[in-house]
Image (cartoon, rainbow, N blue to C red):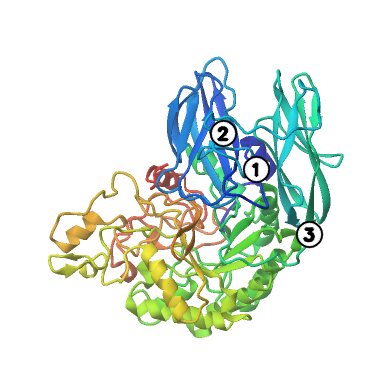
Amino acid sequence: MRRKLALISAAAVVATTGAVAVATQAFAASGCSAKYTVVNQWPGGFQGQVDVTNLGDALTSWTVGWDFGNTSQTITQIWNADKTQSGVHVNATNLSWNGNVATNGAISFGFTGNWSGSNPNGTNFTLNGVACTGSTGGSPSPSRTSASPSPSTSTNPTAPTVALTSPTSGSTFTAPATVGLAASATAPGSTVSKVEFYNGATLLGTDTSSPYTFSWANVAAGSYSLTAKVYNAANVTATSAPVSISVTTTGGGGSHVDNPYVGAKVYVNPDWSAKAAAEAGGSRVSNQPTGVWLDSIAAITAPAGSGYATSLRAHLDNALAQGATLAQFVIYDLPGRDCAALASNGELGPTEIDRYKTEYIDPIAAIEADSRYSSIRIVNIIEIDSLPNLVTNADGQAGATSACATMKQNGNYVTGIQYALSKLHAAGTNNYEYIDAAHHGWIGWDTNFGPSAQLFASTAKGAVGGVATVDGFITDTANYSALSEPWIQPSVTINGQTIRQSKWVDWNQYTDELTFAQAFRQQLVSAGFNANIGMLIDTSRNGWGGSARPTAASTSTDINTYVDQSRIDRRIHAGNWCNQSGAGLGERPRATPATGIDAYVWIKPPGESDGSSSLVPTGPNNPGGKGFDRMCDPTYTGNGRNGNSLTGALPNAPISGAWFSAQFQQLMQNAYPAL
């Protein structure tokens, strides 16, 4: 059972960060909206945050420019970007890993700085030289000043002016809608004190800093007239021309897209975010989207005393409040769950398939089918480690277990997944199902590669709707396999021997997740899946940065020495999976990072333990009665599944799902790309 912190409301998060997403229904070649937030301030220093939404065409690189209010404001450290500063002007440019930004995609980076006298907000934001006015069609702005706003209804030359820049008149949204409002405002001879946003005569929200924005959530079907009202320091006001929009119902979430991550704002789980932010340095990643694990029946409703703070419905309500358009849930409660590992054994016995259907899948499907959530693309990750166990750990292999043999013989893994696919796919066109496909260090061998694809295909074909119920597959969930291995690809030959002959690779056809996922996708299509299926790769803990990361290929002519000195993955054995020492955060979540890959995602929330490093008896600290797996014990010398090697697990780990501060700090320290 994954224990949760108390819910932090999305409204509180917005109030703290000031970040608001701006939605738009159409885009031109260029345009952007920007938000500058002082996250924290102290005498002489401060922490700032910049969030820019690309309203124009997709980008492959970016430069965000802005002006500080006085010359004392200087940046001392920046993350998620590089920077140059000349006087009051700053240019922040992308790093190697975050240059691609989709239409309506977000650019986000933070920094610390110095100030004296005053610390005003940054102004005159540009994206690749185009002023960020909250609308599209802007032109390069060499003077770095914002485009002039459209005139307001005021004719007094000393009065403030205001214009709604988003949404545009005639825009249509799908109920329950999240409508992003943005306005430009000026106050000649004075300052803008605030901008209010209205639907007719009803006040929706207020913003006091430029760019002026508000996210109107849960908007029902109907027609609306929106305006913005500006106040200057003397309390003189002006009101914008009205903008008419309509919100309609489509029933079942509108059209089903090929890649749900493109253009999506992905839900940030407040429970995980609060834990991450409470760690020293954790605010650098606490705004990242992670998976929500529905790992028991109680996780669906989160009753009092269950150890869960936030129910499935509450998570979806939080997503609406955040203006999120995609949320990720892990479906993880099969009968006889995790037959080859004890650390995450589930609550249902091997034969309790009826409870799985009626008490677990049916309630999830009913909630996800609620039209209230039709604006959210709901991504379900289907049953981690289940079908792969039937391929590799059920019949005579070195890692075979009697529990896996039982689940293969009774068929309840296959039956359960078929039922989950049938019900969740039917819940609405806004639902997307991705089946877990283990990782290269599990099914990359010839003996496992093809049979796994065939088992996945036969399982999906038995669902109501067949292979159309599957949108794709995910690899490396909750694992540590390196995303790319530049120097130990299987085609490399050292002193007449191929890399596959080394002890580490052990004749595997793949050495990293990206090449494996791309090749396995083709195998799945050959097995009968639709040609447009996509792959997800969980990169939450496979960065392997820090001082141990090799920077060049080894010069050794001994194949084992060459591989050990050249590999990015620093595990003792590729079969080690529990709380790995030396691991780091990997690529940050983003859409379409490589051919055939729908997204890099963080489905395993960094900082949640894989399992206890020592025996924990059932009781208040272990309400789910999870088993003790010696693969989480750093003193254990292994078994057939890891080549009888040491486990490489961190000491003093709590039960699976509990917060593990030492692991989280290590992951940040060894992040690659670095934080």
**Residues marked 1 and 2 touching at CB (< 8 Å):** no
Residue at figure coordinates x 22%, y 65% from the top left:
492
In this rendering, the answer to whether 620 lies above or below 157 is below
Disc nearest the viewer among 3 and 2: 2
Badge 3 crowding class, 10 Å Cα cut-off, few under 14, some 14 to 19, many 20 or more, is some
Query: Tag 2: residue type?
Result: Phe
Task: Check disc 1 and give the amino acid type.
Answer: Ser
Inspect this view and state whether residue 26 appears.
yes
Q: Nearer the viewer, residue 10 or 178?
A: 178
Residue 53 placement: quadrant: top right
Which residue type carries mark 3? Answer: Thr
How far across and how far down the image is residue 567, in percent? 27, 57
Please report whichever mark, 1 or 3, sits nearer to the chain's N-terminal start: 1
Could one spot residue 389 in this view of the protein? Answer: no
Q: Can you say whether 479 is above or below 336 in the image?
A: above
The residues bearing labels 3 and 2 have C-alpha atoms spaced at a distance of 34 Å
Residue 531, position as x, y percentages in the image: 50, 75
Residue 612 location, quadrant: bottom left
| CA separation in Å, label 1 and label 3 | 23 Å
User: Which one is earlier in the sequence, the residue at label 3 or at label 2?
Assistant: 2
Judged left or right of residue 36, residue 476 is left
Query: Dot 2 corresponds to which residue?
Result: 125
Quadrant housing the C terminus: top left
Q: Which residue is mark 3?
A: 248
